[in-house]
Image (cartoon, helix red, strand yellow):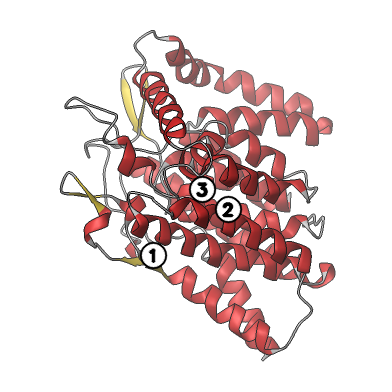
Amino acid sequence: MKKIENVLLFLTLLFLPTQLGRHFWPDFSYIYSLKIDYLSPTLYFWDILVIGLLILFFLQKPKINKLALNILLFFLLSQALSLFGAKNTGAGLVRLEQYAIAGLFGVYLASNKIQDTRYKLFVPLTLGVLFESWLAILQFLKGGTLGFWILGERTFSISTPGIAKFNFQGLEFLRPYGTFPHPNVLAGYMLIIMLLIRSKKTFIGLVTIILTMSRVVILVGLAGLFILQKKNIKIIMIIMIILSPILFTRFSSLFSYDNLTILRREELFISSWNLFLKNPIFGVGLNNFISDQQDLVTGPSRFLQPVHNIFLLALSETGIIGLIGLISLFSFTRHYILYPILFLGLFDHYFLTLPQGYRLLFLVWGLSFLNLKLK
């Protein structure tokens, strides 16, 4: 039974960055007759692996990390309370179920022995970084996807409307997605996993981060290199000088007064505050930001997405109670990887809204109880 558990753990970590799943589309997952992925009940292949892993684990009557379990239960309760009176209870239950599966996986990791966990995690996480890196590089070179739908790679090209692109010297380049829903999520995953395992074998992940052109992740990555790679500071400076024209072009667009990204995020910040004021204690309901936002935003160019800040998102959806629950996840653990997650969470929402995001969050959260560094 232990061997089967080890195989399932290997596969669970290997498939963590994938999004292969079966979507279902009940009425509550539609807005303006459009299917909204955030609201859709989805059975992911990763979920099946985790459920199988947990069943085998509990059948062996192991010693559970009670602190991790109690923190998770408090977090889930704080999120569930927001659903009383929520506009879209179904969407909230979808997110609660996803948090429960990913959170129990974190409890599983927290309940394992350090020496066993280090060996079991290093190989599958490294393989995941290598695969996603090569897939992203090939997407960038081709200007489109490669057909790995079995792993959840979506089908698109550089000409697909709304696809993420980067302009340099009059040329358009596709920002690679890997098997992720957005380049920013791919970049965040690469950064966190590389900081966790800190292996030279994953150096290619740095190339992937640059290709995604994710501004915040690039800044955090550079800061990490200066802190962790002091011996190679000259090489890092040379690389920065070589890349400076591209990075300057990417970052300078932020200072345009009509930058669409800034305007949209400002709109979402305002919406989040207005939603918080509707119910400061319990919020408008877990995973209800988009459902309630449609009543606040008018005009033909409505941008229906969660606010790009995990703390504002928690505050607006689950109120002060839910925010306390979220903060409790980080309050009883000490791990250096949590700090980049908290910082990235100030500028994006995927750690709470997208499958690879909250899987990654609870992976690091579970390991933080072991104060584990994979070397």
Q: Nearer the viewer, residue 82 or 209?
A: 82
Distance (Cα) linking label 2 and label 1:
29 Å
Which circle's residue, 2 or 1, is located before the other in the chain? 1
Work out whether 70 lies above or below 289. Answer: below
**Tag 3's secondary structure?**
helix
Distance (Cα) linking label 2 and label 3:
14 Å
Residue 166 falls in which quadrant of the image? top left
Residue 20: give its label. Answer: 1
**Residue 167: horizontal and vertical position, in percent?**
35, 23
Residue on which disc 2 sits: 78
- Quarter in which the N terminus is drawn: bottom right
**Residue type beneath disc 1:** Leu
Q: Nearer the viewer, residue 109 or 281?
A: 281
Mark 3 burial class by Cα count in 10 Å: few <14, some 14-19, many 20+: many
**Tag 1's secondary structure?**
loop
Residue 302 falls in which quadrant of the image? top left
- Residue name at image x 70 percent, y 66 percent: 69
**Residue type beneath disc 2:** Ser
Q: Is residue 143 visible?
A: no
Camera-side mark, 3 or 1? 3
In the image, 292: left or right of 248? Answer: left
**Residue type beneath disc 3:** Leu
Residue on which disc 3 sits: 352
**Residue 297: horizontal and vertical position, in percent?**
27, 28
